[in-house]
Amino acid sequence: MKHLALTFCLLLGGTAGGSLSAQDVVTLPKPRMERPATLMQALSSRQSTRVFATSPLSEADLADLLWAANGVNRPADGGRTAPSALNRQDVDVYVLRADGAFRYDATRHALARVATADLLPAAGGQDFAATAPVVIVLVSDLSKFGGPADEGARRMGALDAGIVAQNVALFCAAARLATVPRASMDTAALRAGLGLTDAQEPMLNLPVGHFAR
């Protein structure tokens, strides 16, 4: 990510994982709408993969992946690539890497650093998960549906996260990247590391990387 255009600002509320020693906000390249794969090709290629190469994702691939996951595709009204129940847009996309954790700011198409610590082990449960260079964590803000004690709220949050996960999976298939949707993770560690509230529930995570050769 060192070649990305960088913008500096102080995040409201501070960060988890200690004081920041790096940039707080990373402005991402614009999504490349000219990618050649069709939807039918992506569906044909989609598969779950649990072995990853060690090479990092390119800045362009990460930017396009995040936009495809839950980016703004209709700027006039803030519409997203993923639908959500009652249009509450409850799902936040977090990026875990060895150099810290970031929240995807869809409105600005940017990454906001929320932690300097390596939280990849918290997306564990299965050893292969932390071997990917990036893990995408999907968090639903259940306060937008009535709160975490509401069974209906949890159901809607889980469904919305599943839709975003499918966007990630289809993008990866089109971009020839490896991924697998997972529910296994240390939610307590992620909640603490990402600075989540009690109403923000980690629902799914997706390790993403290049196919091992």
Image (cartoon, rainbow, N blue to C red):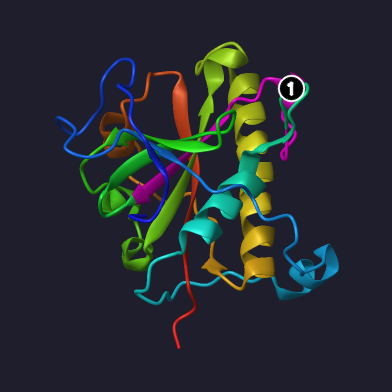
Quadrant into which the C terminus falls: bottom left
Question: Could you tell me which residue is drawn at 59 percent across and 11 percent down?
Answer: 146
Near-viewer residue (89 or 3): 3
> Residue 65 appears at what percent x and percent y?
58, 53
154 horizontally vs 187: left or right = right
Question: Could you tell me which residue is drawn at 53 percent across and 72 percent down?
Answer: 49
- The reply to whether the magenta stretch includes residue 49 is no
Quickly name the residue at label 1.
87
Magenta stretch, residue numbers: 80-96
Label 1: state its secondary structure.
helix
Question: Could you tell me which residue is drawn at 76 percent across and 19 percent down?
Answer: 86
Seen as rendered, the residue at the extreme bottom is: 213
Res 200 quadrant in image? top left
> Residue 85 appears at what percent x and percent y?
73, 25
85 horizontally vs 117: left or right = right
Question: Could you tell me which residue is drawn at 61 percent across and 29 percent down?
Answer: 157
Establish if 130 lies above or below 110. below
Near-viewer residue (156 or 205): 205
Q: How many numbered discs, if any?
A: 1
Establish if 102 lies above or below 35. above
109 horizontally vs 191: left or right = right
Seen as rendered, the residue at the extreme top is: 146
Quadrant into which the N terminus falls: bottom left
Say what amino acid the circle numbered 1 marks: Asn
**Mark 1 crowd level (few <14, some 14–19, many ≥20, 10 Å Cα):** few
> Residue 162 appears at what percent x and percent y?
64, 44
- The reply to whether the magenta stretch includes residue 84 is yes
